[in-house]
Image (spheres, rainbow, N blue to C red):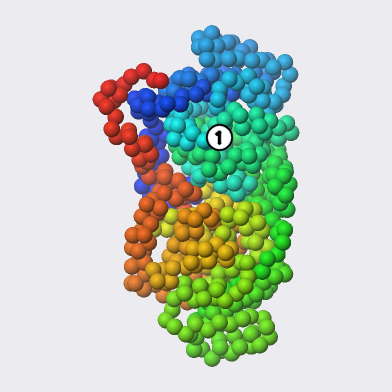
Amino acid sequence: MCWYRAIETFDIKRRTFQYKASRNQLSRSQSDYILAKCANRPLFSIIVPVYKVKRKWLEKCICSVICQHYRNWELILVDDASRREDLKKLMNTWALRDSRVHTYYLETNCGIAGATNFGIRQAKGEFIGALDHDDELTPDALTWIIWAINKYPQAHWFYSDEDKISGDGRSHSPNFKPDFSPEFLLSNMYTCHFSVYSRDVLKKIGGLRKGFDGSQDHDLALRLSEVVPRDKIVHIPRVLYHWRAIPGSAAMGIAAKPNAPSVGRKAVAEALKRRKLKGKVTSYEICPTIYQIEFEPSEFPKVSIIIPTKNALSLIRKCITSVRKYTNYPNFEIVVINSDSDEPELLEYLTEEQSENRIEVMHYNKPFNHSEMNNIAAASVDSEFVLFMNNDIEVVSEKWLEQLVAVTQLDESIAVVGGLLLYPNGMVQHGGIILGLYGTAGHAHKYIYSSVPGYLGRLHALQEMSGITAALALVRRSSFEHIGGFDSSRYPTLYNDVDLCIRLRKEGYRCIYNPMVRAIHYETKTRPVVAEDFLFKKRLVDDYSEILKNDPFYNPNLSLNNEQFCGFRPFPVEDQIPELANMSEDYRDGTDSV
């Protein structure tokens, strides 16, 4: 697994909040208060495969479970034939000290998958989680899981954020994750620690599989995602797991598990095969456990590429030339919207291209309204998909249109697909839209160089986002028509794509970012920013204030003052569980844990 944080030092002065692991944890009294209100308090089984670990790390691991605020658990320690007397003595000591600790000793080494499966077979808990033998849970970890189980009683899979913990006990490098995206899971085993599954669903898929050691958890998660609906997978945006970063640990780098990338590619390839999808799986060169997939469409529905322009011959010519150069897709057309152009050279170019049947030209002779002209063009075509493209786009990747269309074929709920847009100097202009940045919305990873992985490898990973820029966006036309297209009255220019994607998501449609599609965006070269644009910013806040505060594919722990996933913000537990503000003095004074 690669958790490379490329922009950790991007701009340290812009951080509004320094990370401290314990700052946003539940206190014991807060846990007591929450647990007292939870009607369902099931038994947890926590499985720890043990093999040739330092005694002190295993003891810290065990103690992190012993110290849980929630007390209805069992700890299953499975020694995978380590034949270490010091470990055996430690495990037996804890088993004698606490009846909830159970120890097992395998005669032959079964690997992490085999040892974990053995533990699953011994488990009596309704929910099962795994803990590596040198890692630690936060004291409130199971409390948060119980809270989530009671809030989402139909859920089968819970996962949390995590951080790393050094040998001297210092927590650092938090991984603040997005909510569940099956597409992101294909590219990255991001759910990882701490994951808790219902015992029934684990048994349904047969637990972990042999032959996937090194990426066994990724293979498990991919198979689980095929039987557990998205609405039954819950992300808890709290660090509940400390991943030990010491020499020899995967937390320190992929060198600890050199086979992980090849096994991970195998797991992803088999997932595609099970889902009857065609695609070539490769590792991202800088971060080999980020998997990139070159999908192949199963069919080739017609696509209308709609490009508005007002004059700007050099831009529109470069745009259309790049489309032709990199497009082998067999079923597409180019529709250029002439927005009241008056340059003779541009008009001559459009006339010539149309006469040669290379493009269709639609004339829009009204004051500039980007939304309205695109709505009119989309209504005039008979294609299954429309692809909105700015005239300042230059496509630079092969099979770009195939990749966009193929992603829509992953799931009928996918209505919008976009790609990685770059400035001419190689910096990122757009990697998906994040809601809430600067109070409205921003572009993921903007202004970092495309040669780095980005936050959690997300810059180069397929994933769901809350929005995609209309500078280059493939849109399912039936979905577009279902919500009435762009809102040309409220958002004629700016934020029309943000508004469109929000309304699509409210209807159950989804937006996907595919980094295999690349283009250069010569942004803002055709229209200057004017004072009126600030009115649209205020309008977006007025229309969607609550939605802008809670982007499910960002994280409430990450700063909102930049687009580089840099820095943190306060996320008090009361913001997630408002009832905690009403705790009685009895609980504030402290009571016994449930």
Which quadrant of the view contains residue 117?
top right
Provide residue 580's location: percent of width, then percent of height: 32, 33
Q: Nearer the viewer, residue 3 or 496?
A: 496
Which quadrant of the view contains residue 265?
top right
In the rendered view, would you say 390 is above or below 17?
Answer: below
Residue at screen point 57% across, 76% down: 380
Residue 538 visible? The answer is yes
Kind of element beneath mark 1: loop
Q: Is residue 421 left or right of residue 272?
A: left
Amino acid under disc 1? His
Provide residue 121's location: percent of width, then percent of height: 65, 22
Q: Nearer the viewer, residue 144 or 154?
A: 154
Residue at screen point 70% across, 70% down: 331
User: As drawn, which residue projects farthest toward the left?
Assistant: 585
Residue at screen point 56% across, 47% down: 181
How packed is label 1: few (under 14 Cα within 10 Å), some, or many (20 or more)?
many
Q: Nearer the viewer, residue 287 or 104?
A: 104
Provide residue 397's location: percent of width, then percent of height: 65, 64
In the rendered view, would you say 266 is above or below 131?
Answer: below
In which quadrant will I find the C terminus? top left
Residue 429 visible? The answer is no
Provide residue 154's location: percent of width, then percent of height: 52, 35
Question: Which residue is under mark 1?
Answer: 156
In which quadrant will I find the N terminus? top right
Q: Is residue 246 left or right of residue 19?
A: right
Q: Is residue 280 left or right of residue 452?
A: right
